Image (tube, rainbow, N blue to C red):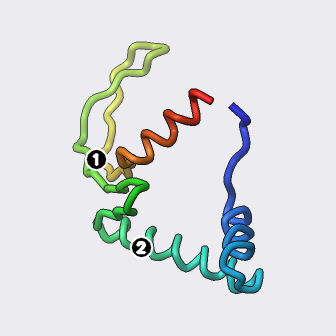
Amino acid sequence: MSGKTLTRMDLSEAVYREVGLSRNESAQLVEDVLEHVASALVSGENVKISSFGTFTVRSKTARVGRNPKTGEEVPIEPRRVMTFRPSHLMKERVDAGNKS
Protein backbone atom coordinates (compact mmCIF):
# COMPACT_ATOMS: atom_id res chain seq x y z
CA MET A 1 0.00 0.00 0.00
CA SER A 2 1.22 3.47 -0.81
CA GLY A 3 0.02 5.07 2.45
CA LYS A 4 -1.11 8.22 0.57
CA THR A 5 -4.29 9.93 1.72
CA LEU A 6 -6.63 11.65 -0.72
CA THR A 7 -7.36 15.13 0.64
CA ARG A 8 -9.82 17.91 -0.16
CA MET A 9 -6.97 19.74 -1.85
CA ASP A 10 -6.32 16.71 -4.08
CA LEU A 11 -10.00 16.60 -5.02
CA SER A 12 -10.17 20.31 -5.81
CA GLU A 13 -6.97 20.05 -7.85
CA ALA A 14 -8.50 17.18 -9.85
CA VAL A 15 -11.63 19.26 -10.49
CA TYR A 16 -9.41 22.16 -11.55
CA ARG A 17 -7.53 19.98 -14.07
CA GLU A 18 -10.52 18.00 -15.39
CA VAL A 19 -13.31 20.59 -15.46
CA GLY A 20 -11.36 23.76 -16.04
CA LEU A 21 -12.82 25.86 -13.24
CA SER A 22 -10.49 28.21 -11.39
CA ARG A 23 -8.70 26.81 -8.36
CA ASN A 24 -10.97 28.81 -6.02
CA GLU A 25 -14.13 27.68 -7.82
CA SER A 26 -12.91 24.07 -7.78
CA ALA A 27 -12.20 24.21 -4.05
CA GLN A 28 -15.62 25.77 -3.39
CA LEU A 29 -17.34 23.09 -5.50
CA VAL A 30 -15.65 20.30 -3.52
CA GLU A 31 -16.58 22.02 -0.23
CA ASP A 32 -20.20 22.45 -1.36
CA VAL A 33 -20.52 18.78 -2.37
CA LEU A 34 -19.00 17.55 0.90
CA GLU A 35 -21.22 19.90 2.92
CA HIS A 36 -24.31 18.67 1.07
CA VAL A 37 -23.38 15.03 1.77
CA ALA A 38 -22.66 15.77 5.43
CA SER A 39 -25.93 17.68 5.88
CA ALA A 40 -27.92 14.83 4.38
CA LEU A 41 -26.26 12.31 6.72
CA VAL A 42 -26.82 14.53 9.76
CA SER A 43 -30.53 14.72 8.92
CA GLY A 44 -30.67 10.91 8.72
CA GLU A 45 -30.82 10.52 4.94
CA ASN A 46 -28.90 7.88 3.01
CA VAL A 47 -26.40 9.15 0.43
CA LYS A 48 -26.01 6.94 -2.63
CA ILE A 49 -23.33 7.76 -5.17
CA SER A 50 -23.86 5.63 -8.25
CA SER A 51 -20.96 3.25 -9.05
CA PHE A 52 -19.26 4.27 -5.80
CA GLY A 53 -21.34 3.26 -2.78
CA THR A 54 -23.90 4.20 -0.14
CA PHE A 55 -23.39 6.10 3.09
CA THR A 56 -26.00 5.38 5.78
CA VAL A 57 -26.55 6.43 9.37
CA ARG A 58 -27.53 3.77 11.91
CA SER A 59 -28.73 4.20 15.44
CA LYS A 60 -27.06 1.91 17.95
CA THR A 61 -28.77 1.19 21.23
CA ALA A 62 -27.17 1.39 24.66
CA ARG A 63 -25.32 -1.72 25.71
CA VAL A 64 -22.83 -3.01 28.21
CA GLY A 65 -19.28 -3.29 26.93
CA ARG A 66 -16.17 -4.64 28.56
CA ASN A 67 -12.78 -3.02 29.02
CA PRO A 68 -10.48 -5.60 27.40
CA LYS A 69 -7.58 -4.70 29.66
CA THR A 70 -9.34 -4.95 33.02
CA GLY A 71 -12.44 -6.97 32.16
CA GLU A 72 -14.55 -4.28 33.86
CA GLU A 73 -18.06 -3.79 32.48
CA VAL A 74 -18.64 -0.32 31.04
CA PRO A 75 -21.95 1.13 29.84
CA ILE A 76 -21.89 2.31 26.21
CA GLU A 77 -24.30 5.14 25.45
CA PRO A 78 -26.69 4.99 22.49
CA ARG A 79 -25.26 6.72 19.45
CA ARG A 80 -25.56 7.21 15.73
CA VAL A 81 -22.83 5.84 13.47
CA MET A 82 -22.13 6.29 9.79
CA THR A 83 -21.52 3.24 7.64
CA PHE A 84 -20.34 2.91 4.05
CA ARG A 85 -21.21 0.10 1.72
CA PRO A 86 -19.27 0.10 -1.56
CA SER A 87 -21.04 -0.70 -4.82
CA HIS A 88 -20.20 -3.92 -6.60
CA LEU A 89 -18.41 -1.87 -9.29
CA MET A 90 -16.21 -0.22 -6.65
CA LYS A 91 -15.45 -3.60 -5.08
CA GLU A 92 -14.41 -4.94 -8.49
CA ARG A 93 -12.17 -1.93 -9.18
CA VAL A 94 -10.45 -2.25 -5.80
CA ASP A 95 -10.03 -5.99 -6.27
CA ALA A 96 -8.56 -5.46 -9.76
CA GLY A 97 -6.11 -2.94 -8.28
CA ASN A 98 -4.98 -5.51 -5.72
CA LYS A 99 -4.06 -7.95 -8.49
CA SER A 100 -1.86 -5.58 -10.50
Query: Looking at the image, is 2 positioned above or below residue 51?
Result: above
In which quadrant will I find the N terminus?
top right
Q: Amino acid at mark 1?
A: Pro
Secondary structure, mark 1, is loop
The structure residue drawn at horizontal position 74% and vertical position 73%, both measured from the top left corner, is 17
Using the image, tell me which numbered label, if any, was put on residue 89.
Answer: none
Can residue 31 be seen by looking at this rendering? yes
Name the mark nearer the viewer: 2 or 1.
Answer: 2
The structure residue drawn at horizontal position 65% and vertical position 82%, both measured from the top left corner, is 28
Q: CA distance from mark 2 to mark 1?
A: 21 Å
Whole-percent x, y for residue 41 in the image: 37, 65
Question: Residue 16's quadrant in the figure?
Answer: bottom right
Counting residues from the start of the chain, the first of labels 2 and 1 encountered is: 2
Query: Looking at the image, is 66 positioned above or below residue 92?
Result: above
Query: Looking at the image, is 99 positioned above or below residue 51?
Result: above
Using the image, tell me which numbered label, if any, was put on residue 78.
Answer: 1
Can residue 85 be seen by looking at this rendering? no
Secondary structure, mark 2, is helix
Using the image, tell me which numbered label, if any, was put on residue 39.
Answer: 2
As rendered, which of 88 and 38 lies closer to the eye? 88
In which quadrant will I find the C terminus?
top right
The structure residue drawn at horizontal position 73% and vertical position 35%, both measured from the top left corner, is 2
As rendered, which of 49 and 18 lies closer to the eye? 18
As rendered, which of 56 and 43 lies closer to the eye? 56
The structure residue drawn at horizontal position 42% and vertical position 21%, both measured from the top left corner, is 67
Question: Residue 65's quadrant in the figure?
Answer: top left
Q: Which residue of the protein is positioned furthest toward the right in this rendering?
A: 23
Whole-percent x, y for residue 92 in the image: 44, 39
For disc 2, the neighbor class at 10 Å (few under 14, some 14 to 19, many from 20) is few
